[in-house]
Amino acid sequence: MARITLDPITRIEGHLRIDVEVNGGSVTNAWSSAQMWRGIETILQGRPPEDAWIYAQRFCGVCTTVHAISSIRAVEHALKVEVPLNAQYVRNIIMAQHSVQDHIVHFYHLSALDWIDVVSALKADPKKTAQIAQSISNWPGNSETEFKAVQQKLKSFVDTGRLGIFSSGYWGHPAMKLPPEVNLMAVAHYLKALDYQRKAAQAVAILGGKNPHIQNLCVGGVATAINMENLATINIEKIAAMRALMEETRDFVQQVYYPDMVAIASAYKEWFKYGRGVVNYLAVPEMAEDTRNTKFALPGAIIANGDVKGARVITNHQDLDLIANIKENVAHAWYEGDRTLHPWEGETKPKYTDFQDNGKYSWCKAPRLNGKPVQVGPPAQLLAAYAGGNAKVKKLVDDTCRKIGVGVNDLHSTMGRLGARAIRAHIMADYSLEYLDKLVENVGKGDKVYANHTEIPKGDFKGVGFHEAPRGTLSHWIVIENRKIKNYQAVVPSTWNASPRDEKGVLGPYEASLVGNPVAQPDKPLEVLRTIHSFDPCIACAVHTIDPEGKEITKVKVM
């Protein structure tokens, strides 16, 4: 039996360590260890609730927008504040377009290199590459000239001995199986994706004021001024610019990203058998379409043991059973004690020890729903909407499974997570434009309300802000006392998925998904990376920095 430690896992946000035991060519045990402490909860204590969303965005350097949305919803839930339709539409556009940007980055820049042999692309025939690309998509960028130029650029990297962004890959690994022409196509689209994810970010910035760290939220709505004839506001010209950006990203997602994912999934169909792990799922409703967060375009659901037909569909954010039964355990996390607490009573008191297989080994807590681990993310989101009867989701999921030659139950897998993310990007690209049209229509009807002005009243309040972020269910929990934050906890998607064992010794989703995974070469554990990257880990945010030589520059301790 061999013990493999991957530390840090690269091509993710943050610092994650994965340990696996391999016996007979497959994983028999696993540990997921978040290697950074997040102290924002402590920083927020004693601050004004209406400012929480600004600080909460700093939970992460990538998914800032999602924390802003969850945080503002937590305060609004606590105070029972209604949000005008214009504000809901603005938020929906931002959320959808952020998802598009996030999913593009994940597939091409964070996970695709686990499946694509970059060096193999040097052997490709650009003409054949163009023929393959044109057979699966009518995107105008799939030309022989384009692929030949990319191949020459790649060759110049190799000739100089510097692969740049493509260095340190497991090129030539026996688990790589795409032909050179498909590898060249994917490398070309990898480079194009850099431009299109930027366009999605630009669309968010137009509405949000900047990106990352949007600036346009307020308790009760948004501070976005929209006047089609005023040069100083979001006007017809900026709406047109935003629409053009979102149409470009939609076309890239639907004509490049989605077909690429279908092609790769079809070539690696055996990976629908690996990475199953925890098949309890949670997703909350998203894309609000009323002022009270009781009507959503996408339903949520709690799914037990992968049973989609038996799912308990969630239709609003006031689901009392859901709110009551989310708890976090710290038996194997680097915090004081071993208790299981509801987030409103949650504590964030760090207590570091060495890595202990049977003790504490992660900065990540262990969230549980009704005492059980759950997986969150694109499969949960799609399966919840599928169970809830969303026609758009059901059609695209069924069509995609048919194209690949798998069933809906095959989404419980490493490749299923990647496929689900491409489907979700496809859907969110459409929602971006749909809600832009609804916003313009509503403003055209004369609705000029973007926020219900709200002051924090005296008294004690509790609230939770749910949001279905690109990586899965996100919730911010706030306790307000005397107009100040008494307690604040965030249960983020990667906390659910990267969870260590709980007090019963039950593995978290990352850990469980690795058991049974093949490992062809223990010194090059590509297969472990494939499964972990399929979750799109986001382990934020660091409390120390290092210089290029690895020496610590400074350490921040929050008391």
Image (tube, rainbow, N blue to C red):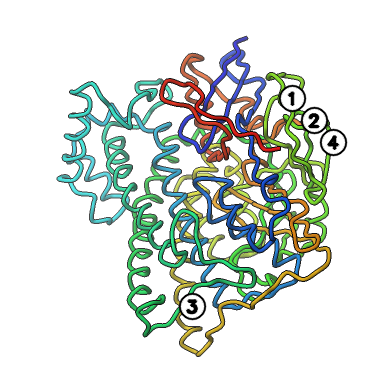
Q: Quadrant of the N terminus?
A: top right
Q: Earlier in the sequence, mark 2 or mark 4?
A: 2
Query: What's the mark number on residue 409?
Result: none
Q: Residue at x 61, y 78 (%)?
A: 84
148 lies above or below 224: above
Q: Please state the horizontal and vertical placement of residue 350, each as a whole percent of the image.
A: 73, 32
In the displayed structure, does residue 319 sit left or right of residue 390? Answer: right
Front residue of 68/455: it is: 455
Q: Residues within 10 Å of mark 2 (few under 14, many from 20)?
A: many
Distance from the alpha carbon under mark 3 to that under mark 4: 46 Å
In the displayed structure, does residue 177 sit left or right of residue 532? Answer: left
Callout 1–callout 3 Cβ contact below 8 Å: no
Judged from the image, the secondary structure of the residue bearing numbered disc 1 is loop
Q: Residues within 10 Å of mark 3 (few under 14, many from 20)?
A: many
Front residue of 118/483: it is: 483
Q: Residue at x 57, y 32 (%)?
A: 274
Front residue of 275/170: it is: 170
Distance from the alpha carbon under mark 1 to that under mark 3: 49 Å
**Farthest-out residue, bottom:** 446
Q: Please state the horizontal and vertical placement of residue 366, each as a whole percent of the image.
A: 73, 37
Q: Which residue is mark 1?
A: 360
Callout 2–callout 4 Cβ contact below 8 Å: no
Query: What's the mark number on residue 331?
Result: 2
Q: Which residue is mark 4?
A: 339
Q: Please state the horizontal and vertical placement of residue 400, each as a whole percent of the image.
A: 48, 52
Q: Please state the horizontal and vertical placement of residue 464, each as a whole percent of the image.
A: 73, 58
Judged from the image, the secondary structure of the residue bearing numbered disc 4 is loop
Kind of residue at badge 4: Arg
Q: Which residue is mark 3?
A: 439
Q: Earlier in the sequence, mark 1 or mark 2?
A: 2
